[in-house]
Image (spheres, grey):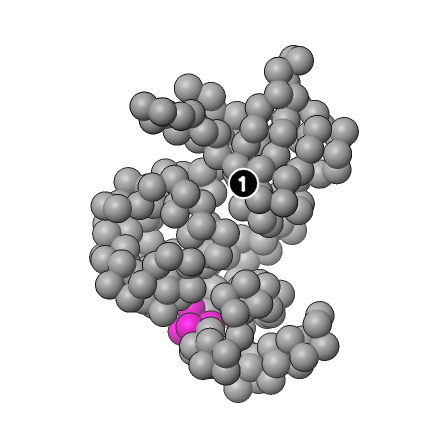
Amino acid sequence: MIGSLRGTLLDRGPDGELLIEVAGVGYRVQVTPSTSVTIGGIDGEVFVHTHHAVREDSETLYGFATVDERRVFELSISAHGVGPALGLAILSVHGPDALRVAVAEDDVAALCLVPGVGKKTAARLVMELKSKLDLPDGPVIAIHDDGSASSAAGGARADLRAALEGLGYAADEIHAVLSDLPNEGATSDLLKEALRRLASGV
């Protein structure tokens, strides 16, 4: 099985597919939109952790920026009814820390933001993933790229997500603005800032 790839990025497709050349061989790798954008430039060296999915009629490589993303993906697809495509869709909407928050907080609405996931499926996923994901007893702590840590503030974000959904904003808009907001603060203040950013296109 292929566990990782390091090579030259030859192409970045609009459908979340990367073409990575390693020792003269081009590998087509499915990634989340955030990984596609941040992985690097065309003709530059890139590295991805991979999950090699083998089926009777196809073989597909799924790529991840971190080992944690791959682990969470593999735990997600071990849940009943979750295939690789849905597992990648879940990570496209919720990163590992955000998914842990949603599961720890029984936030069914958060999982409903994933395309193709309804309330019944989301509720079942929350139950199954609770026994699979490594959830701490206390609040989920997010570790940032600069080494700092902060509370993921799942309750406030769940309320904020529900409010924005009720106002008619699309899942991708909600995900984008939530990823840029501070991890702490009153829901009312966060909502005002979210609406300001959505209105200005920030």
Q: Residues within 10 Å of mark 1 (few under 14, many from 20)?
A: many
**Residue located at (62% from left, 65% from top):** 180
**Residue located at (27% from left, 58% from top):** 121
Identify whether 20 is placed above or below 199. Answer: above
The reply to whether residue 189 is in sight is yes
Task: From the viewer's side, name the closer residue of 52 and 67.
Answer: 52
Quadrant of the image for the C terminus? Answer: bottom right
Task: From the viewer's side, name the closer residue of 160 and 27.
Answer: 27
Give the main secondary structure of the magenta stretch: helix
Task: From the viewer's side, name the closer residue of 110 and 104.
Answer: 110
Identify whether 11 is placed above or below 112. Answer: above
Percent across and percent down for residue 36 are: 62, 43
**Residue located at (42% from left, 58% from top):** 115
Please give the residue where the numbered disc 1 appears in the rendered image. 31
Identify whether 34 is placed above or below 50. Answer: below
Residue range of the region highlighted in magenta in the rendering: 154-158
Rendered image quadrant of residue 114: bottom left
At mark 1, the secondary structure is loop
Percent across and percent down for residue 24 are: 66, 13
**Residue located at (69% from left, 33% from top):** 11
Percent across and percent down for residue 126 are: 28, 58
Quadrant of the image for the N terminus? Answer: top left
